[in-house]
Amino acid sequence: MVKGEIAIAAPVLRHPAAPSLPPPIGGRLPVASPDRFSSIAPIYLVAAVIVTGDVLGNAGLNLPIHLASIFAAFTAVLYAMRRPREALALALATIAVASSISAYAALHPSSGKDDVTRYADRSPITIEGLVARPSDNLPGIVRIYVAVASASIAGGDLTPATGTIRITVPAPARFEIGDEVRATGAIRFPYQLGDLGEFDYRGYLYRNGIAATMYISGGRSGAAITIIGHRNLFPATWIEHIRRRIGDQIDANLAQPERGVLRAIVLGDRNGIDQSIRDRFALTGMAHLLVISGLQMGLLAATIFAIVRLITGCFRRLTERGMGNKIAAAFALLAVAAYGVIAQDHVSTVRAIIMVAAYTAAVMLDRPRAVMASLAFAAIVICLAYPASSGDAAFQLTFAVVIVIVLGMRRVTAWRKKWSRITAQSPPPTVGWIMWVAWFIGASIAVSFWAMIGTAPLTARHFNQLSMVGLAANAVVVPIIGLGATVIGLAGAGLCLISTPAAAVPIHVAGILIALGIWLAGWFLALPGSWMRTFTPTWLEVSLAYGFIVLWLVGPTDDKFASPSRLRWIAFGVLAIVSIGDAGWWIAQRDYNRDLRVTFLAVGEGDAAVIRFPGSRVMVIDAGGSFSGLDPGETVVAPYLWSRKIMTVDYLVVSHPDFDHYGGIAFIARNFRPAEFWVGPEPGHDQSYAELLGLLSQMRVPRRVIDASEPPMDIGGVTVRCLGPQPGDIRDNDASMVLQFAYGPWSFLFTGDIEAPGERTLIASSNAAGALRSTVLKVPHHGSATSSTDAFVRAVDPALAVISLGYLNRYGFPSPAVVDRYRALGARVARTDETGEIDVDAGRDGIRLSTWREDVTFERRFDPP
């Protein structure tokens, strides 16, 4: 940090008569020097380059570490040559490079000789280590975080090891910080399925310092975990005991869902919040009320400040010496610090503490208070303490919303000042009070409005939803939960450390307020059109949206920081041109596409494919089905569709009623309004499949039973034939729907899970020699040895064989003999477990093949058959 910046913002040259205001973000700077760059407060420049470097590291830019050293050396040379402007620019570039290197390193950790990453993925190991963080108590499971001290292959001698492993065990289980544990199980390293729009699970684990995971359950042979000792770690153990005491008091006095919400806003523990409650607040634009953010911290600080200031006002000498505000700020800072310590080191909590601490410190030191400078300081500290944080959605949302609120309220304040001048002409005695009440209500609504505007682009990007009632909902519910329940709940938390009976009253009151807030959130959600789904905007589109927002907010007001109108019009023109070009490109891709585009999605052990026909019609064939509790329709298929600007599906197809094929179909049906539902004659045996059919019937989606008797169909110039099963065939896997898509000289064959008998039937029922021959084959039954017989492989003779399967799956798919069989005929074999998503674009003149993973991405043109 640059010397002297404890004042939060460096002084800016201004006219003697100008008010003491913080430097604006953008717009004209009222400085005497013509050098606008050097007149910007250093804290803004440093924050900008550190965040930029962090973003570049998140984006995968791998810069050599010696580059920063070279830049630093040249910076020193330029300063020695008395070239301060160039030296400053190069110094900032040095900081950006260093920041990018640390961010990249956080997401691509190197493996030392003692690191747990030296073991093979999914290999059984035994580890000993220390519980280093608070456990996560989720429905049915508990997650503990173990700093490994030693490890070995299960049954071997333990040797020194390093790294943090997240271990998942069945509930109920109780682990404390400082517990020494021994665990045996299969180690798992972060793995991405590899699909466009997929959540960055690997990055999430690495940002949180987690090198690997392990699952301990009764159904896993040899898996076990035991506590072998305990160490008191000051202050972590002491803080954990306080958290546990507060949590036990909340649990004893409240039932769900109020209990889970109060634990979230007091302790930062969101694990007890039911998914329905999360959805209720998220869809109404109030998800921020369920985390400890700047809102709660700010309201707590303001409440403590007001109370202490009121008390100090009773002491005349303190007031005369100007100590009232300083003492109140000090108490507010202590309260916020205590709140943060109890709530642990979540990024949103750290960011809020830093901002409030910086602002209150400025009050105590009689220095200019600038919210933007506090925000910049928070960004610097977080990116330095937690490299790669800029890739986290919470980081992006919290900083974006604060910036937009601050800039937006600047306009509201300018309007208030203008209105005050108008109404200051001999007002009646009651006007003053009316104006203050109106200003308070208006300010609350304005803050909600700017928060909604500030979060909208990122909410669309990360969650594919927009709240239409967020403005009204926040204005009503924030005072109830954000202020009332939070402050009263914290008072109860403090009292429970002194007297548990005394703490029961404020905890019950907080619970009543939370119940009211939950009911109101449900009421707002029930309103027609309360929320809507959106496609996934690209980062370019997110940047364009914020560009327009900032351009609007830094427009002329009554103050002296108005942006030049010419510059604003130029910026607006550039943004408009880029926006029109972007929209035109997507319209051409979405509605005027001339290729047949087939995407085989990586959904683990299951099948899922998206077919985009020439024109704009879309078909989804299967949607995977995970037995781990995750819905691949929600986590993989839907994000892919939204990322391609697809909001409706014309044809929803289930090849056969096995869960690994239909498990994600329900989510697609609810969110993409399918026009038709295709299903084979096999009725299915699972209750979940019956529920899926009931859902589609309830939605009045027309259902078509498709078998080999179905005449060929033309969809966008593509001939679609159903080659199997034969009418009335319900032989489990062999009753899978077999579809062939022909477009010009190219053809695609989807075979579901047919096995050897089904393949023989398919060959025998083909009306003409070569009818099964296809350019691209979706290999039957995930490459199982019971399928892909030699006769079938020769009948299809594919140029590309795509195998959809799970990474290191327990079934041993694909069979090596099956893979060799395809390769022996000259077919290229592509596997979703190795390459991730597989895209095949077929045009009239060729086929382009690409995959998700950069290290194995390939492109190849096939000659027409």
Image: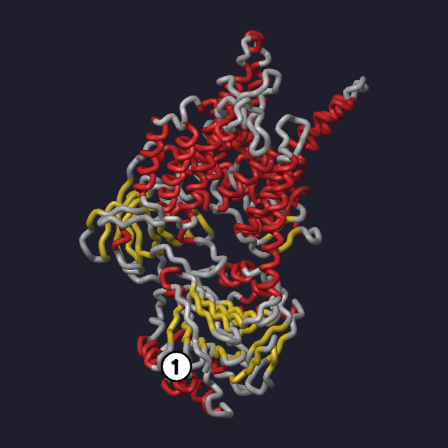
Q: Is residue 426 visible?
A: yes
Q: Does residue 660 lie above or below 9 as drawn?
A: below
* 210 to the left or right of 349: left
Q: Does residue 244 lie above or below 820 as drawn?
A: above
Q: Which sits in the foreground, 431 or 100?
A: 100
* Residue lying at the far left of the rendered structure: 157
Q: Residue 146 appears at what percent x and percent y?
A: 32, 46
Quadrant showing the N terminus: top left
Local crowd size for mark 1, using a 10 Å CA cut-off: few (<14), some (14–19), many (≥20): many
* 88 to the left or right of 120: right
Quadrant showing the C terminus: bottom left
Residue drawn at point x = 58 percent, y = 55 percent: 582
Q: Does residue 562 lie above or below 794 as drawn?
A: above
Q: Residue 17 appears at what percent x and percent y?
A: 62, 16
User: Exactly how many numbered labels are in the figure?
Assistant: 1
Tell me, what colour scheme is on the image?
secondary structure
Residue drawn at point x = 44 percent, y = 53 percent: 200
Residue drawn at point x = 30 percent, y = 55 percent: 224
Q: Does residue 797 lie above or below 833 as drawn?
A: below
Report the amino acid beneath label 1. Ser
Q: Secondary structure at mark 1?
A: loop
Q: Which sits in the foreground, 46 or 462?
A: 46
Q: Quadrant of residue 344?
A: top left
Q: Which residue corresponds to mark 1?
A: 788
Q: Residue 307 appears at what percent x and percent y?
A: 58, 21
Q: Is residue 670 visible?
A: no
Q: Which sits in the foreground, 772 or 479?
A: 772
Q: Residue 221 appears at what percent x and percent y?
A: 30, 62
* 789 to the left or right of 592: left
